Image (cartoon, rainbow, N blue to C red):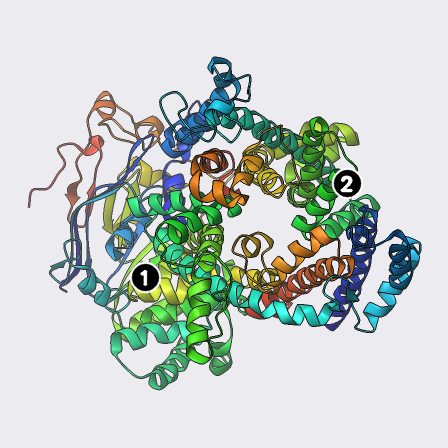
């Protein structure tokens, strides 16, 4: 309750003059107190570790086709069973995780970079620069995302892009669709920051543009960017899985969680061999929920006002 | 206000024009067309058909023609279905609307109630539970949860049909038909509700938490009003106000169908129509669908803004 | 005059992550019928929290602990069940707040907000309530009452809104009006008008007022009895004339010294040195010792008791040790 908080801060006003650790370490300590967020972080780290290290310890990491062990149900030898080529599903899920996590992470970095850069530039310079950038963003936001991704995916297939490269192009596609939303947010934040006192002070001091931008505005955007970035990874992993599921993203033999669920498009596998498609689905779910919960915890400690 | 609206309308038209050009070029860029996909045709016949459909003309000329027709209310002719695109939309869009309307209603209903209660009891175990469920709902891959529920509820337990809108070969009419449709739509509606309810609940919870902290809520309590009145008459009204803008944003979802859900549940909606036309490269239909969504998005945004201006007494006057 | 409100050893603590804040620490006070009692102090001294505790508006806050007794007409508000308390709130005890601009609901009209307590407590019809609301708006000195009833809060000025708040507060003829810094957010000229309105209503209805302020000018104008709070505790209390003529506690003396006096030329206005102490986990002492020019050894280690040293004045200060009157 605001009035209580007000009385509290009022009552606690002198607290502020007491020695306080830096904002970041304070935020970190508050984050550690949020059990939900910490458990989210633990799950995310766990997923990354087992996906990147797990296959090293798997006896089936070579993905050899084994006709003698096709479509086996989960057992002690194959914890999650085998697929129709006799490959170990658990090993495949972990290997797929590497790709899915990498795609999610990389496309996040790219779209956050694009979104932050374009949004900050638009919000800072305003005028014609702002107009051009934001009109392009409006245009991209008007075109429905999924059909746009489908067109790109179809283009890739028709141009016979080698499977090895598809992964990188999928990253590009996802960032292309994602940046306008981020740019809008950063621009909005930028516009409100511009009006704050400390920026006015920078103007009075006659600091040069780039210096103002880099030293005064960007640090204030960092909390927003960190939170957006975190939540964006989950979204990117989900989008990649949708594309790959419809055969328009990363293609086999490169496994991703999305294209492994493609097994469900086969009636027999869907009904009789659920171990082929349920584990990758659960992996997506577990990873994304962990990322979202962690991201929300981050948002709480870094910028409570930003809650949406 | 009227200059504001007319400015907005002009900008909308410009954006839509640019979007249509971009989409048209993208679809034109996609190699292969409806005719090349048909292996039964001889090369001569293919060339002939391309001539008839105007597929061998330059992209910009085709776009100009499409645009000209679109202005006259003609969004082209589906090559695969041999029907005008608009009449096809009319056939399918109401099926999509049925699913979307049912799930939107359920989503809002659940989200408002759960959001309000959870905000009121912030930090209680109920609130924590709601938060975890909200995150779960927001983190589900739509196609996977669809498949998973089909597998469990339809295939294994056989409680509900796995897909379609009516039982194959059925010619039920009247009440029997309605019951059959409800039976078939239950599962997809549940899935769509699960997928949508997370973020909306969170939205209402956050709004409500902000509102409960306001001074005027304290005043309402100081007046000795019942807690239910404080919550639902004073707080909820203020929390719902920003949500009015969401109504506009629901527009594309209401009429644009859901590509993934309709595909997975084999629901004869406009999204499913798009998905099947996509593999056939039925460009007029793809173009028409994409533009339909774009138009709905733009109109929805405008409606949101206008509704906000109408609903908030603080904004209304200015 | 009989006692209307009696606060007995009220403790309101906030348990926070950093420790316990004793916002109100062992406060006892009385408000007699028809009397105006002023609580004075700097921000953060616990005066608002005292008022909110009386209204029961703090219950349900995370980490709060309220102890002691608050008797209103002989009934303990703190141990009362929710429904009973609600029937008193807005009816027999009403409250107005510091920020009139944010204290009214922006999406409801003034009229709607005025009618609510009337319908709730007086059980009258909406039509009658509307009529009564318009009369009340007129009573607090606003012209065109019909039109005001139909307008939304953002269409009125702060002074008008505070009048509306007063109108809402007095709508059910309360026996006690709690006013928490009612004029702080307003312009000086408007302040005087609002105080006038309050005095006038008090004269007409004979209600008691518990007025919370940091402004000694307001105290001088309104109070019958004054309570000075510092860091959650009462340091001095007494009848207004006695207290203004011979303030006892060094803090009260400081407060009065820092008030400009008309006709007296001063080079610079006195201000009490130092700051209010951190309320987190305070050790037993006189909380004012750091800022006090008469600070003694005992002040740092032992808490002074509030003792009656004159017939109409009590003080909690070691300087007056042994001066207590034992009645």
The reply to whether residue C188 is visible in this rendering is yes
Please give left or right for residue C160 compared with residue A157 in the image.
left
Residue B14, label in figure: none
Nearer to the camera, A42 or C101: A42
Q: Is residue B159 above or below residue C326?
A: below
Instruction: Please identify the quarter of the rendering in which residue C31 is found.
Output: bottom left
Q: Is residue A133 above or below residue B161?
A: above
Instruction: Please identify the quarter of the rendering in which residue C309 is found.
Output: top left
Q: Quadrant of the N terminus of chain C?
A: bottom left
Q: Are marks 2 and 1 on the same chain?
A: no
> Which chain contains the residue that carries disc 1?
B
Kindly identify which residue carries mark 1.
B221
Q: Is residue A69 above or below residue A267?
A: above
> Which chain contains the residue that carries disc 2?
A
Residue beneath the point at 85% across and 64% down = B67
Please give left or right for residue A220 compared with residue A81 in the image.
right
- The secondary element bearing badge 2 is classed as helix
Kindly identify which residue carries mark 2.
A158
Q: Position of residue A124 (x, y in %)?
A: 74, 40
Q: Is residue C201 above or below residue C130?
A: above
Closer to the observer: label 2 or label 1? 2
Q: Categorize mark 2 by other alpha carbons within 10 Å: few (<14), some (14-19), many (20+).
A: few
Nearer to the camera, B4 or B13: B13
């Amino acid at each position: 309750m605001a009035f209580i908080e007000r009385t509290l801060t009022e009552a606690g006003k002198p607290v502020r003059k007491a020695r306080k650790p830096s904002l970041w370490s304070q935020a970190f300590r508050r984050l550690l107190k949020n059990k939900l967020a910490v458990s989210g972080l633990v799950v995310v780290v766990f997923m990354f570790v087992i996906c990147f290290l797990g296959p090293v310890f798997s006896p089936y990491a070579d993905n050899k086709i084994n006709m003698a062990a096709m479509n086996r149900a989960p057992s002690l030898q194959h914890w999650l069973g085998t697929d129709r080529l006799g490959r170990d599903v658990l090993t495949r899920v972990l290997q797929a995780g590497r790709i899915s996590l990498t795609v999610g992470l990389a496309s996040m970095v790219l779209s956050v970079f694009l979104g932050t850069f374009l949004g900050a530039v638009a919000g800072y310079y305003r005028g014609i620069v702002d107009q051009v950038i934001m009109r392009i963003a409006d245009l991209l936001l008007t075109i429905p995302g999924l059909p746009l991704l489908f067109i790109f995916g179809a283009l890739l297939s028709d141009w016979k892009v080698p499977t090895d490269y598809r992964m990188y192009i999928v990253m590009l596609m996802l960032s292309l669709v994602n940046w306008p939303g981020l740019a809008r947010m950063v621009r909005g934040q930028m516009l409100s920051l511009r009006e704050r006192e400390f920026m006015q002070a920078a103007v009075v001091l006659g600091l040069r543009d780039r210096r103002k931008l880099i030293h005064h505005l960007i640090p204030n955007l960092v909390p927003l960017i960190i939170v957006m970035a975190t939540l964006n990874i989950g979204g990117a992993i989900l989008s990649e899985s949708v594309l790959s599921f419809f055969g328009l993203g990363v293609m086999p033999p490169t496994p991703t969680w999305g294209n492994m669920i493609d097994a469900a498009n086969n009636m027999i596998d869907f009904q009789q061999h659920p171990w082929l498609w349920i584990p990758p689905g659960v992996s997506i779910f577990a990873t994304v929920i962990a990322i979202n919960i962690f991201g929300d915890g981050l948002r709480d400690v870094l910028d409570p006002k930003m809650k949406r | 206000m009227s200059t504001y609206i007319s400015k907005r309308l002009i900008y909308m038209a410009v954006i839509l024009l640019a979007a249509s050009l971009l989409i048209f070029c993208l679809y034109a860029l996609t190699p292969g067309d409806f005719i090349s996909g048909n292996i039964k045709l001889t090369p001569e016949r293919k060339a002939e058909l391309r001539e008839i459909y105007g597929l061998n003309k330059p992209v910009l000329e085709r776009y100009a023609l499409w645009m000209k027709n679109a202005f006259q209310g003609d969004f082209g002719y589906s090559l695969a279905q041999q029907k005008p695109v608009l009449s096809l939309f009319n056939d399918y869009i109401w099926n999509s609307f049925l699913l979307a309307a049912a799930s939107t209603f359920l989503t809002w209903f659940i989200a408002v109630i759960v959001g309000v209660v959870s905000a009121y009891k912030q930090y209680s175990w109920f609130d924590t539970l709601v938060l975890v469920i909200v995150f779960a709902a927001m983190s589900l891959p739509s196609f996977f949860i669809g498949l998973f529920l089909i597998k469990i509820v339809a295939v294994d337990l056989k409680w509900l049909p796995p897909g379609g809108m009516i039982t194959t070969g059925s010619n039920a009419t009247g009440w029997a038909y309605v019951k059959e449709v409800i039976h078939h739509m239950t599962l997809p509606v549940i899935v769509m509700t699960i997928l949508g309810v997370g973020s909306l609940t969170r939205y209402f919870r956050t709004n409500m938490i902000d509102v409960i902290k306001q001074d005027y809520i304290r005043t309402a309590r100081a007046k000795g009003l019942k807690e239910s009145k404080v919550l639902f008459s004073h707080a909820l009204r203020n929390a719902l106000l920003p949500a009015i803008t969401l109504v506009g944003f629901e527009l594309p979802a209401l009429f644009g169908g859901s590509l993934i859900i309709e595909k997975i549940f084999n629901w004869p909606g406009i999204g499913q129509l798009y998905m099947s036309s996509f593999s056939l490269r039925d460009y007029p239909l793809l173009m028409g669908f994409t533009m339909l969504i774009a138009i709905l998005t733009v109109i929805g945004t405008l409606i949101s803004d206008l509704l906000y201006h109408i609903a908030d007494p603080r904004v209304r006057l200015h | 005059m009989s006692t209307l409100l009696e606060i007995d050893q009220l403790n309101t603590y906030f348990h926070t992550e950093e420790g316990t804040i004793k916002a109100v620490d062992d406060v006892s006070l009385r408000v007699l019928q028809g009397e105006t009692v002023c609580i004075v102090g700097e921000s953060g001294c616990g005066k608002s929290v005292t008022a909110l505790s009386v209204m029961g508006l703090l219950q349900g806050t995370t980490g709060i602990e309220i102890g002691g007794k608050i008797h209103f007409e002989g009934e303990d508000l703190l141990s009362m069940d929710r429904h009973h308390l609600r029937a008193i709130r807005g009816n027999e005890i009403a409250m107005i707040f510091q920020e009139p601009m944010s204290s009214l609901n922006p999406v409801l009209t003034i009229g709607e907000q005025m009618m609510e307590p009337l319908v709730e407590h007086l059980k009258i019809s909406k039509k009658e309530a509307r009529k009564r609301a318009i009369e009340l708006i007129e009573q607090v000195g606003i012209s065109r009452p019909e039109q005001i009833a139909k307008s939304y809060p953002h269409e009125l000025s702060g002074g008008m809104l505070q009048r509306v708040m007063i109108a809402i507060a007095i709508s059910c003829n309360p026996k006690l009006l709690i006013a928490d810094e009612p004029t702080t957010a307003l312009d000086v000229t408007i302040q005087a008008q609002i105080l006038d309105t309050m005095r006038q209503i008090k004269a007409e209805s004979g209600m008691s007022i518990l007025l919370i302020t940091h402004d000694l000018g307001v105290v001088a104008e309104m109070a019958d009895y004054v309570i000075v709070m510092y860091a959650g505790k009462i340091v001095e209390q007494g009848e207004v004339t006695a207290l203004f003529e011979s303030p006892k506690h060094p803090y009260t003396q400081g407060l009065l010294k820092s008030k400009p006096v008309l006709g007296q030329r001063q080079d610079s206005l006195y201000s009490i040195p130092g700051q209010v102490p951190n309320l987190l986990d305070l050790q037993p002492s006189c909380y004012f010792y750091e800022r006090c020019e008469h600070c003694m050894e005992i002040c740092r280690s032992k808490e002074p008791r509030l003792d009656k040293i004159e017939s109409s004045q009590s003080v909690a200060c070691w300087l007056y040790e042994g001066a207590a009157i034992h009645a």
